Amino acid sequence: MLTFEKVLAAFKDYLEEDDCCTVLMTPRGYTILEWDDSCQNWAEAEFCATPETMRDLLLADLACHLKNKITSCERPLKDDERKKVQQQVNEIAALL
């Protein structure tokens, strides 16, 4: 059974590395917050009603983060880079 704790454990390294993404416990449950490009304001907030929702949102965030690390947001991914990103995302998904 998927739990929030399992999701957070699987994404621990990613969440420690990406300072633009924060997972907070709120009175209503977990919420994923993302900073804007200037890191001055929150750009997005996604409520995670279920562990599956959290998993799916963090998988998408991880893929974006890995892409940006490779390209510095200056170009599209090459085919081999896209495969590498997908492989890393799949490895995390397999843990869950």
Image (cartoon, rainbow, N blue to C red):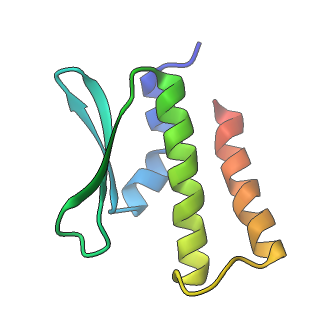
Nearer to the camera, 36 or 84: 36
Residue at the outermost top position = 1
Image quadrant where residue 10 sits: top right
Horizontal side, residue 30 vs residue 84: left or right: left
Measuring from the top left, give residue 47's x and y in whole percent: 34, 32
Measuring from the top left, give residue 33's x and y in whole percent: 30, 48
Horizontal side, residue 35 vs residue 11: left or right: left
Residue at 50% x, 41% y is: 57
Residue at the outermost bottom position = 74
Quarter of the picture holding the C terminus: top right
Residue 76 sits above or below residue 58 on the image? below
Residue at 71% x, 76% y is: 77
Residue at 23% x, 70% y is: 39
Residue 12 sits above or below residue 14 on the image? above
Horizontal side, residue 35 vs residue 69: left or right: left
Residue at 29% x, 66% y is: 36
Residue at the outermost front position = 43
Residue 25 sits above or below residue 72 on the image? above
Quarter of the picture holding the N terminus: top right
Measuring from the top left, give residue 3's x and y in whole percent: 48, 19
